[in-house]
Image (cartoon, helix red, strand yellow):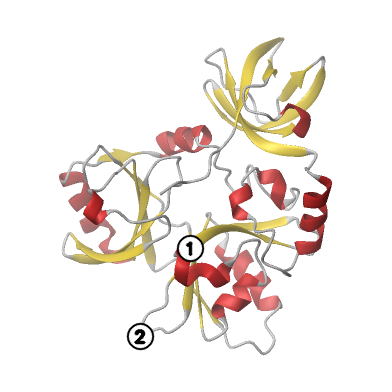
Amino acid sequence: MSSPSTLFDLTGWAWVRLTGRDAHKFLHNFCTNDVLKLPQTYGCEAFVTNVKARVLGHIFAFEAADAETGPAVDVFSFPGQDAPLLAHLDRYLIREEVAFENRTDATFTSLLSGAVPQDDEALRPFETRHAVVGKCRVTMRRLDLLGEPGHLIVGDRENVAHVREAFLESGATSGDAATFESRRIEAVLPIYGIDLSEDQLAPEAGRPWAISYTKGCYLGQEPIARIDALGHVNKLLRGVRLEADVVPERGASVVADGKEIGTVTSAIAGTALAYIRSKYSEPGTIVAIGSSNEEIPAQIFASSEPRP
């Protein structure tokens, strides 16, 4: 690696594998992005929605086909999402040739964030490469979770200590949960169950690259198409940067023009995530966040689409 990087432990985040002739098509029919393009694009971010376009899951799908497994898709998601996602998909399985495997408990996951490999080593977003680290076989997958180049390091759970030690010895620094929380809020990355749930419509998450408006029918497609035709949703998830180094409470009000225009979902000192009325969601908009008996001036910012 040619620049400083931080190693975060994401072991326990969900991994689900779909295999079989219909694996890609089946997942394609139950998420918001174009999974059929995975062999060409390596992967995609998407939402799993119900028929009303409410968010049941926030996923990252990786092409996983090889000569041994045949057609396959690996789905990465947030902690605790493996069982609900599997139950949802299994509910709709009829005659399709697809099998599900929960790989969460057998897998360790680390995120090497901020690492920029040399050009001849660089992975494109969602691209997969197999490697040996600390004498252990691992799978490396490009995923810019925190608004900077990032790589998931995935392997058998029993090898986690050896792999972690190898990366730290090569110059990576160890990142703790507090550092991850800070960086993910700065990157406007919602955590399912905290900032995102079935209470939200998929477009409200403020991640338009995770939704294809040209892929055709899927569960939840009709409400999302209507939203697109109308031009916008009523609220969007945004970052809010405060002028004071305080931590807003979850549920704190975001105000503008003398009225409440949003609600905080997560926060660190000086920065928060909040659902903001669309009228006030443009980056750079000046707002305020209520804290105790005062309102603290703040400014809206948004997440940005990962780039190669």
Taking 89 as reference, is 305 above or below it?
above
> Can residue 3 be seen here?
yes
Q: Does residue 48 appear to the left or right of 259 in the view shown? A: left
In the picture, measured across the screen, residue 96 lies left or right of residue 268, that is right
Identify the amino acid type marked 1. Answer: Gly
**Above or below 19: residue 305:** above
| Residue receiving disc 1 | 43
Instruction: Say how many tags the image has.
Output: 2
Q: Which of the two residues, 4 or 154, is positioned nearer the viewer here?
A: 4
Disc marking residue 21: none
Nearer-the-camera pick, 256 or 120: 120
Foreground: 194 or 65? 65
Q: Residue at position x 60%, y 54% from top? A: 210
Q: Position of residue 78 (x, y in %)?
A: 53, 54
Residue that numbered label 2 is attached to: 68
Type of amino acid at the residue the image marks with label 2: Glu
- Horizontal side of 77 relative to 50 (left or right) equals left
Helix, strand or loop at mark 1: strand
Q: Residue at image x 62%, y 20%?
A: 299
